[in-house]
Image: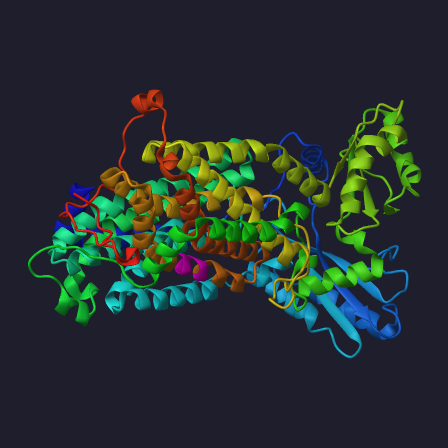
Amino acid sequence: MTALARWCLRRRLAVVLLWLVALAGTAAAAALAGSSYSEDYRVPGTESGRATALLERDFPGSGGDDTIVWHTASGTVRSADVRQRMSHTLREIAELPGVASVDGPYTGSGGRISPDGRTAYADLAFRGAHGGGDPDAGQVRAVVDTARAAAGDDLEVALGGSSIGLTEGANSHLSELVGIVVAAVVLFVVFGSLAACLLPIATALVGVGTAAAGTVLLGHVMPVAGFAPMLGTLIGLGVGIDYALFIVTRHRKGLRQGLSVQEAAERAVATTGRAVVFAGGTVCAALLGMLVLRLDFLIGVALAASLTVLLTVAASLTLLPALLSFLGRRVLGRRERRSAVPAGPGPDAPTGLAARWSALVERRPKLLAAVAAGVMLVLALPAFALHLGTSDQGNNPASSTTRQAYDLLADGFGPGVNGPLTLVAELDGAGERLAFDRLPARLRGTPGIASVGPAEHGRGGASGVIAVVPDGSPQSRATSDLVRRLRAETLPRATAGTGLEVRVGGPTASYDDFAAVIRGKLPLFVGTVIGLGCVLLLLAFRSVGIPLKAAAMNIAAVASSFGLIVAVFQWGWGSESLGLGRAGPIEPFLPVVMIAVLFGLSMDYQVFLVSRMYEEWLATRDNRRAVRVGLAETSRVINSAAIIMISVFLAFVLSGDRVIAMFGIGLAAAVALDAFVLRTLLVPALMHLLGGANWWLPRWLERRLPRISIEPPEPLPTCVLPVARPELEDVRPVA
């Protein structure tokens, strides 16, 4: 690490230029290639996946879900005025660029008019919307504007569907800007220097920007979820600013002790830089743990997020030293530059709140541990009510046109119309075709089913499809129960002796299958991530107790953050007032991604806290002193880093994207609890209670474990420790 820092310092201009070229090159390539993200939740081998494959083969173009909905408060949609106005609007929309077809209710059977006659809808299809990627957002916007222009008097017009949702994209730039501004304010308070506070932000932005462009390119070679770029930015800004903060803090410390700029930068990278590599590697390992699930939808997310963390670590170790060299001693405030020690490094004793808090935890470990455990338990209670499912446009903010269309359809035609089920079967021979044609009559009157459409045939009668509208909404447990009953009981009885094999598909069934697969593989994933983290900490700290406590603390942070997510998003506590839409289920992939990210981020604080304790333990073999010193020296930096990360994560709630808001609130809550409750309260309290058992390792395991060092101690002189006031003890390591 020292050699790397020295090389970057000597070739500082080349390092900065290389990073700028990498950023500009990937950004240009991404702009030329364009985005190609996937929202395909299908899991190979599931019933809904096979049904969808059959639909795409024999019923091409049948998967469109875009609609134009209108509702009149007085009269009916069949009145001459409404009919004339909407017929003209539909003809106008059909002639717009990018529109493939518009099928309204005023031709044919008129089945698109609600029973009370007040609501109607038209099916809308865009060219290239299904099978060829997303339609052009500008063309979709023109359709929305044209349709909305027809509203007036007592006529309400709204549009819904996946393509329409493109016009309500998340405002990621606002959230990024807010997060960066808040982080800059916190850094300025911590450092007292404008130059120093800009360094971590500049480093993180270069790393995250390069990774964001790389994620766009990655979407062309494998499935990458549409939320992956914003999730990567959210994680990258948080960890990138924090990693740079740790290195800049150590660099400034060296300057205050009288080291030259080059010596201070080299020592910062050689010591704290190694901890950054270990922490970043842990985050990447936790994210890549998602690969054990073997779900295409999550593989791209894991690789994109890992790429972001990797590049932020690389920027912290290379670009940051080069920038430190350019700034020289200006990373210190004017008062700090005047008071820096000219004769060389000396002891630097922490005082103030950090030292007093450390002494308080030492004096009252049992009480404080009980309080911390109680807080975590109360916050985790809502997590027991976790309901995994996929939110839809019914969860959008009430002001959005997609939410308005969703509600109008639900009010006029019943909630199930927004998530119909699709029954698909391959038909071999006249007998199976006849049995399939009779199936709608057998299904009518089945509990949980509102209506059943006629049987339709495709590919010369070799396959058939039936649309089934449930009584409940797509997100309701009743609809999920209906899917299970259809598969396990209703359809097998209705087709007994006919040879038919009818599969239940459609978006609702696909989401249920996806959630079921996630639930089934979640124990394997959690076990993999926990086991990997324990092994890394075992190697780093040569202790059995440290990894076990870390695993328990990580699980506590995850459970408590999920409790908050359930309260806000599933129970709806404040979700509408925050602009996050209506209450609904929690996305099935959220636990996987959240657990991976949280385990990685919590390891950061565990490493920075316990590595200082371990260093002091090796020097003194005094557990009480080791815990007190480690907490006093690291708590201020950990808390500052946590405030920055919390600010960045919460800023993404402003994005307007429900999924990203879930990640933002969940990660912010987890980091806050991890930093302010677990790492600075519960962990040190437990370590005081366990005493020397914290560092116990069986001798046979000691002999077999390889030796690694996360952050080697600095070569500082021995300090004399006062004993009268422990909170003011010199906590520099004994040489």
Q: Check the image and name the residue furthest to the left.
A: 343
Magenta residues, as a range?
642-647
Please say if 695 is above or below 240: above
153 on left or right of 726: right
Residue 34: image location, x then y, percent: 46, 52
In this view, the residue in front, 174 or 102, is 174
In this view, the residue in front, 432 or 531, is 531
Residue 632: image location, x then y, percent: 32, 54
Q: Residue at x 47, y 58 (%)?
A: 649
Image quarter hosting the C terminus:
top left
Q: Is residue 429 visible?
A: yes
20 on left or right of 73: left
Principal SS element in the magenta part?
Answer: helix
Q: Residue at x 58, y 33 (%)?
A: 523
In this view, the residue in front, 349 or 673, is 349
Q: Is residue 645 magenta?
A: yes
Q: Is residue 730 magenta?
A: no
Q: Check the image and name the residue furthest to the bottom.
A: 153
Residue 193: image location, x then y, percent: 25, 68
Picture quadrant of residue 181: bottom left
Q: Check the image and name the residue furthest to the front.
A: 724
274 on left or right of 142: left
Q: Is residue 217 visible?
A: no
Please say if 354 is above or below 603: below
Picture quadrant of residue 326: bottom left
Give the image's coloring scheme.
rainbow
Q: Residue at x 67, y 37 (%)?
A: 516
Q: How many marks?
A: 0
